[in-house]
Amino acid sequence: MLPIHVTVAAIIEYHGKFLMVEEHTSNGGVAYNQPAGHLDPDESIEQAVIREVKEETGLDFEPEGLVGIYTLNPAGNGNYYQRFCFTGSVNGGLETSPQDPDIIAAHWMTLEEILECLNAHRSGLIVKCLQDYLNGYRYPLDILDYSGDEDLLQQQSLNFLHEQL
Protein backbone atom coordinates (compact mmCIF):
# COMPACT_ATOMS: atom_id res chain seq x y z
CA MET A 1 0.00 0.00 0.00
CA LEU A 2 1.31 3.45 -0.89
CA PRO A 3 1.75 5.98 1.90
CA ILE A 4 -0.45 9.02 1.38
CA HIS A 5 0.13 12.13 3.47
CA VAL A 6 -3.11 14.09 3.76
CA THR A 7 -2.54 17.84 3.94
CA VAL A 8 -4.72 20.93 3.99
CA ALA A 9 -4.09 24.49 2.81
CA ALA A 10 -6.01 27.76 2.87
CA ILE A 11 -6.21 30.53 0.31
CA ILE A 12 -7.27 33.69 2.10
CA GLU A 13 -7.54 36.85 0.01
CA TYR A 14 -8.16 40.34 1.30
CA HIS A 15 -8.15 43.39 -1.02
CA GLY A 16 -5.99 41.68 -3.65
CA LYS A 17 -3.46 40.26 -1.17
CA PHE A 18 -3.06 36.64 -0.18
CA LEU A 19 -2.08 35.34 3.22
CA MET A 20 1.23 33.46 3.08
CA VAL A 21 3.52 32.13 5.78
CA GLU A 22 7.29 32.26 5.90
CA GLU A 23 8.56 29.13 7.60
CA HIS A 24 11.66 27.23 8.60
CA THR A 25 12.29 24.07 6.58
CA SER A 26 13.70 20.79 7.90
CA ASN A 27 16.99 21.41 6.07
CA GLY A 28 17.55 24.77 7.80
CA GLY A 29 16.22 26.94 5.00
CA VAL A 30 13.24 29.23 4.68
CA ALA A 31 10.20 28.67 2.49
CA TYR A 32 6.91 30.37 1.68
CA ASN A 33 3.62 28.53 1.79
CA GLN A 34 -0.07 29.06 2.14
CA PRO A 35 -1.17 28.34 5.71
CA ALA A 36 -1.06 24.55 5.51
CA GLY A 37 -0.28 21.35 7.32
CA HIS A 38 -1.10 17.74 8.00
CA LEU A 39 -4.27 16.13 9.23
CA ASP A 40 -4.19 15.08 12.90
CA PRO A 41 -5.80 11.83 14.13
CA ASP A 42 -9.58 12.00 14.69
CA GLU A 43 -9.81 15.31 12.84
CA SER A 44 -11.95 16.17 9.82
CA ILE A 45 -10.42 17.90 6.80
CA GLU A 46 -12.27 21.12 7.70
CA GLN A 47 -11.16 20.97 11.34
CA ALA A 48 -7.57 20.51 10.15
CA VAL A 49 -7.54 23.63 7.96
CA ILE A 50 -9.15 25.74 10.70
CA ARG A 51 -6.53 24.52 13.19
CA GLU A 52 -3.59 25.00 10.80
CA VAL A 53 -4.59 28.58 9.94
CA LYS A 54 -4.93 29.36 13.65
CA GLU A 55 -1.55 27.80 14.53
CA GLU A 56 0.35 29.39 11.65
CA THR A 57 -1.25 32.85 11.58
CA GLY A 58 -3.23 33.31 14.79
CA LEU A 59 -6.35 34.05 12.71
CA ASP A 60 -9.78 32.44 12.97
CA PHE A 61 -10.50 30.91 9.56
CA GLU A 62 -13.94 30.00 8.30
CA PRO A 63 -13.84 27.70 5.25
CA GLU A 64 -16.34 28.68 2.57
CA GLY A 65 -15.41 26.45 -0.33
CA LEU A 66 -13.04 23.77 -1.54
CA VAL A 67 -10.76 24.99 -4.35
CA GLY A 68 -9.49 21.54 -5.22
CA ILE A 69 -7.95 18.24 -4.20
CA TYR A 70 -4.43 17.66 -5.49
CA THR A 71 -2.25 14.55 -5.49
CA LEU A 72 1.49 14.96 -5.77
CA ASN A 73 4.46 12.58 -5.79
CA PRO A 74 7.18 15.26 -5.65
CA ALA A 75 10.31 13.11 -5.65
CA GLY A 76 8.92 10.18 -7.59
CA ASN A 77 9.79 8.04 -4.58
CA GLY A 78 6.33 6.71 -3.75
CA ASN A 79 5.58 9.28 -1.05
CA TYR A 80 2.28 10.75 -2.15
CA TYR A 81 0.74 13.92 -0.79
CA GLN A 82 -2.92 14.72 -1.13
CA ARG A 83 -3.71 18.39 -0.53
CA PHE A 84 -7.20 19.69 0.15
CA CYS A 85 -7.12 23.41 -0.62
CA PHE A 86 -9.83 25.62 0.86
CA THR A 87 -10.83 29.22 0.51
CA GLY A 88 -12.67 31.26 3.07
CA SER A 89 -12.54 34.29 5.30
CA VAL A 90 -11.09 35.26 8.65
CA ASN A 91 -13.05 36.61 11.58
CA GLY A 92 -11.91 39.04 14.23
CA GLY A 93 -9.29 41.11 12.44
CA LEU A 94 -6.38 40.64 10.06
CA GLU A 95 -3.39 41.13 12.33
CA THR A 96 -1.37 37.94 12.42
CA SER A 97 0.40 36.34 15.38
CA PRO A 98 1.79 32.89 14.49
CA GLN A 99 1.69 30.33 17.31
CA ASP A 100 3.76 27.63 15.58
CA PRO A 101 7.50 28.02 16.34
CA ASP A 102 8.38 26.92 12.78
CA ILE A 103 6.57 29.96 11.37
CA ILE A 104 8.80 33.01 11.07
CA ALA A 105 6.00 35.38 10.03
CA ALA A 106 2.70 35.58 8.19
CA HIS A 107 2.52 38.06 5.30
CA TRP A 108 -0.24 39.56 3.18
CA MET A 109 1.29 39.37 -0.32
CA THR A 110 0.22 40.43 -3.79
CA LEU A 111 0.25 37.85 -6.57
CA GLU A 112 3.33 39.60 -7.96
CA GLU A 113 5.16 39.27 -4.63
CA ILE A 114 4.24 35.58 -4.43
CA LEU A 115 5.63 34.99 -7.90
CA GLU A 116 8.81 36.95 -7.09
CA CYS A 117 9.69 34.41 -4.38
CA LEU A 118 8.83 31.38 -6.56
CA ASN A 119 12.18 29.70 -5.88
CA ALA A 120 11.44 29.76 -2.14
CA HIS A 121 8.00 28.12 -2.39
CA ARG A 122 7.56 25.02 -0.26
CA SER A 123 5.56 23.28 -3.00
CA GLY A 124 4.57 23.68 -6.63
CA LEU A 125 1.01 23.25 -5.45
CA ILE A 126 1.03 26.84 -4.19
CA VAL A 127 0.77 28.28 -7.69
CA LYS A 128 -1.57 25.52 -8.91
CA CYS A 129 -3.98 26.23 -6.04
CA LEU A 130 -3.78 29.97 -6.76
CA GLN A 131 -4.44 29.35 -10.45
CA ASP A 132 -7.55 27.31 -9.66
CA TYR A 133 -8.71 29.88 -7.09
CA LEU A 134 -8.30 32.73 -9.59
CA ASN A 135 -10.15 30.64 -12.21
CA GLY A 136 -13.11 30.56 -9.80
CA TYR A 137 -12.95 26.91 -8.76
CA ARG A 138 -15.15 26.48 -5.68
CA TYR A 139 -16.78 23.27 -4.57
CA PRO A 140 -19.35 23.17 -1.76
CA LEU A 141 -18.06 21.97 1.59
CA ASP A 142 -20.84 19.41 1.91
CA ILE A 143 -19.01 17.19 -0.60
CA LEU A 144 -16.66 16.42 2.30
CA ASP A 145 -18.11 13.92 4.73
CA TYR A 146 -16.47 12.93 7.97
CA SER A 147 -17.45 10.50 10.65
CA GLY A 148 -15.17 9.12 13.29
CA ASP A 149 -17.69 6.31 13.76
CA GLU A 150 -18.05 4.03 10.74
CA ASP A 151 -20.99 2.12 12.26
CA LEU A 152 -22.89 5.36 12.89
CA LEU A 153 -22.17 6.56 9.35
CA GLN A 154 -23.42 3.28 7.91
CA GLN A 155 -26.57 3.33 10.04
CA GLN A 156 -27.42 6.90 9.03
CA SER A 157 -26.94 6.03 5.37
CA LEU A 158 -29.04 2.87 5.69
CA ASN A 159 -31.83 4.82 7.38
CA PHE A 160 -31.84 7.30 4.52
CA LEU A 161 -31.82 4.56 1.86
CA HIS A 162 -34.70 2.69 3.56
CA GLU A 163 -36.73 5.92 3.57
CA GLN A 164 -36.30 6.05 -0.21
CA LEU A 165 -38.02 2.66 -0.70
Image (cartoon, rainbow, N blue to C red):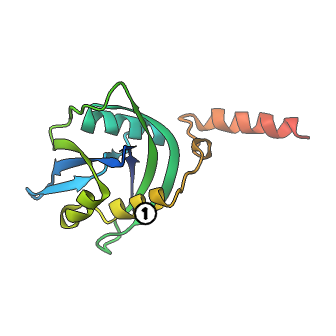
Image-based side of 150 in relation to 36, left or right: right
- Asked if one can make out residue 161 in the rendered structure from this viewpoint, the answer is yes
Which residue is located at x 50 percent, y 56 percent? 68
Q: Quadrant of residue 74?
A: bottom left
The kind of secondary structure element at disc 1 is helix
Q: Nearer the viewer, residue 44 or 125?
A: 125
Direction bottom: furthest residue = 76
Dot 1: within a 10 Å radius of its alpha carbon, few (fewer than 14), some, or many (20 or more) residues?
few
- Disc 1 residue type (three-letter): Gln
Direction top: furthest residue = 92
Direction right: furthest residue = 165
Which residue is located at x 85 percent, y 37 percent? 162
* Above or below, comparing residue 59 to residue 4 in the picture: above
Q: Nearer the viewer, residue 126 or 42?
A: 126
Which residue is located at x 79 percent, y 36 percent? 160
Image quadrant occupied by the N terminus: bottom left
Which residue is located at x 53 percent, y 56 percent? 136
Image quadrant occupied by the C terminus: top right
- Residue 118 is situated, as x and y percent measured from the top left of the image, at 23, 65
* Above or below, comparing residue 79 to residue 99 in the picture: below
Direction left: furthest residue = 28
Q: Nearer the viewer, residue 136 or 26?
A: 136
* Above or below, comparing residue 133 to residue 94 in the picture: below
Q: How many marks?
A: 1
Circle 1 sits on which residue? Answer: 131
Q: Nearer the viewer, residue 14 or 149?
A: 14
- Residue 34 is situated, as x and y percent measured from the top left of the image, at 31, 50
* Above or below, comparing residue 80 to residue 5 in the picture: below
- Asked if one can make out residue 42 in the rendered structure from this viewpoint, the answer is no
